[in-house]
Amino acid sequence: MYFLVDTCFLLHAINLKSENIIDLSPPLKKASLAITHDLLREIKNYTDGSFIEIREFTILATPKTKWKQYKKRYEYLEYFDEADQSIWISSVNTENIALTEDGALYEELIQLGVEVYRLPTFLLLLVAQNRLTKNQVRDCLKNWEDNSQYRIKDLKKWKSELNKLT
């Protein structure tokens, strides 16, 4: 089982570090991270590789036969870019967990029963596993609220879930 990381998720985590809120690279490095070849190309375009080095990721292949089969069966996949399609293909009917900030991809994976996390819910998971403190996540939530990065309704829900954790 791997945590498949999309580029937007990674960029949001990098942004938290650059704003001196939290450095998520240590707990992320402890997870079994994976990307696909398409994600690798995208990540190289958008990052300098200093947050998490590429060698920290397992690179998963998405076989062309599987790719064609899914694209034929699920025509809406064409609306996603190739990197997101590769996350979808590498998550559906597998034990892999997707980490994404792409709202449309998140919704599609949820509907298909794939375990998927957005960055805030992933941070809640890390608190539950004692890898982050509640205060660290509160700082992130405050930052996102100040920057209107997420809907107020979602932020309130995540704050409530955070307060329930011991």
Image (cartoon, rainbow, N blue to C red):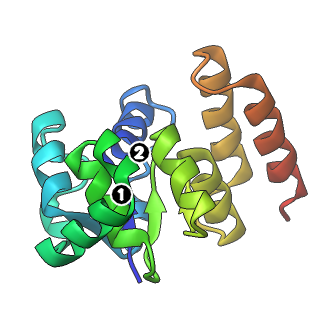
Q: Which residue is drawn at 57% across and 69% down?
A: 115
- Indicate the amino acid at tag 2: Phe
Mark 2 residue element? helix
Mark 1 residue element? strand
Q: Which residue is drawn at 23% across and 76% down?
A: 66
Tell me the residue that label 2 is attached to: 9
The local crowd at label 2, few if under 14, some if 14 to 19, many if 20 or more residues have their Cα within 10 Å, is some
Which image quarter: residue 18? top left
Q: Nearer the viewer, residue 38 or 76?
A: 76
- In this view, 12 is above or below 115: above
What's the mark number on residue 5?
1
- Indicate the amino acid at tag 1: Val
- In this view, 165 is above or below 63: above
Q: Nearer the viewer, residue 123 or 139?
A: 123
Quarter occupied by the N terminus: bottom left
Gap between marks 1 and 2, in whole Å? 7 Å
Quarter occupied by the C terminus: bottom right
Q: Do the residues labelled 1 and 2 touch (CB within 8 Å)?
A: yes
Residue 57 makes an appearance in the image:
no
The local crowd at label 1, few if under 14, some if 14 to 19, many if 20 or more residues have their Cα within 10 Å, is many
Q: Where is residue 75 in the image (x, y as percent from the top left)?
A: 35, 52
Q: Which residue is drawn at 36% across and 76% down?
A: 32
Horizontally, residue 137 falls left or right of residue 69, namely: right
Q: Where is residue 63 in the image (x, y as percent from the top left)?
A: 15, 76
